[in-house]
Amino acid sequence: MTLCFLSLCILFISSSATLQNKVTDNPADELVAAINSNRTASKSSSLYNNPGLACIALQYIKAYQGDCGVVGGENAKRPADSEFAETFAPNCAVEASTLTPITGHLLGCQSKYAKPSVAFSDILMKNGKSLEILQSKNHSEVGAAVSGSDGGGPYFWCVLFSNGKLNNSFVIEGHVAKISRPGCFSGANDDCNGAIGLSGTLHIWPAVVTGLIALAFAFRI
Ligand SMILES: *[C@@H]1O[C@H](CO)[C@@H](O)[C@H](O)[C@H]1NC(C)=O
Ligand SMILES: *[C@@H]1O[C@H](CO)[C@@H](O)[C@H](O)[C@H]1NC(C)=O
Ligand SMILES: *[C@@H]1O[C@H](CO)[C@@H](O)[C@H](O)[C@H]1NC(C)=O
């Protein structure tokens, strides 16, 4: 009996390990897939999809408080570097001692929701510098996030790159990602489509219903 149970456990553990790299129904995971397929097609390495780093990318978006006007361009602002250790990591339960240098970031914002492949090519890859960042050999891992604001647009997309050693950087306490809404982030094996622009306090079932309404609006179904 016990033995049977143990082997079931092992089966379960190994299948969740395999699932870790699966693309779930999550726009942030789909964005990472687009990034990795562009990198491998241009002979750069595929990057590890790190949920701790991705959760921090979602916090990075939240620091903009929905203000698209200060993303890029003349009035560009960015969160202070100290925010990573002081706010972003604690919000994600990422162990401070495992924070690793960010080797590049891509951030884009648009009033309308876009499919991840379109967000990749039309929002994030706007100029030659972005392509250089995307294909840089300096990175070993990536985390992506997408979030709407106030139950709708504007929609922010953020990709953070790092050169950390895979399982040794942006380590989440207890190794279970702290899922927060609104917004979706990659690497956590979290089905998230439709939760992009929701307010954070809803329970699962109303969240799904509201999510469908929000999506219907975004896609004008
Ligand atoms: C990678 O993405 C860039 C920007 O969208 C595009 O110009 C380029 O053709 C892509 N490369 C490959 C190999 O898909
Ligand atoms: C890669 O890292 C080197 C050394 O830190 C730096 O000079 C270079 O600009 C980086 N490349 C990119 C594309 O960020
Ligand atoms: C982390 O990765 C290293 C090298 O790939 C491996 O030897 C080590 O066992 C891993 N540690 C954990 C906790 O998974």
Image (cartoon, grey):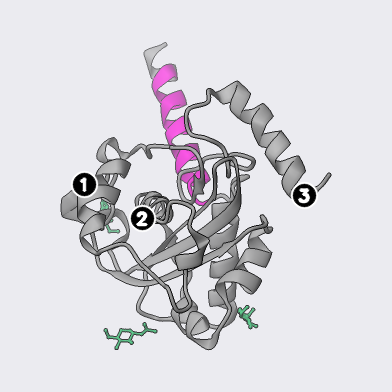
Secondary structure, mark 1, is loop
Q: Please give the label number shown on residue 53.
A: 2
Amino acid type, mark 2: Leu
The answer to whether the beta carbon of the residue marked 3 is less than 8 Å from any atom of ligand 1 is no
Instruction: Specify the quadrant of the image occupied by residue 110.
Output: bottom right
Do labels 1 and 3 touch, CB within 8 Å? Answer: no
Q: Please give the label number shown on residue 23.
A: none
Residue visible at 59% across and 46% down in the picture: 24
Q: Position of residue 201 (x, y in %)?
A: 47, 28
Q: Is residue 134 left or right of residue 123?
A: left
Q: Mark 3 or mark 2, which is nearer to you? A: 3
Amino acid type, mark 3: Phe
Q: Is residue 96 left or right of residue 218?
A: left
Q: Determine crowd level at label 1: few under 14, some 14-19, many 20+ residues with C-alpha closer than 10 A.
A: some
Furthest-left residue in this view: 97
Residue visible at 43% across and 55% down in the picture: 61
- The boundaries of the magenta stretch are 5-21
Question: What residue would you read off at disc 3?
Answer: 219
Earlier residue among tags 1 and 3: 1
Question: What residue would you read off at disc 1?
Answer: 95
Instruction: Specify the quadrant of the image occupied by residue 9.
Output: top left
Amino acid type, mark 1: Glu
Furthest-right residue in this view: 221
Q: Is residue 71 left or right of residue 172?
A: right
Residue visible at 25% across and 43% down in the picture: 90
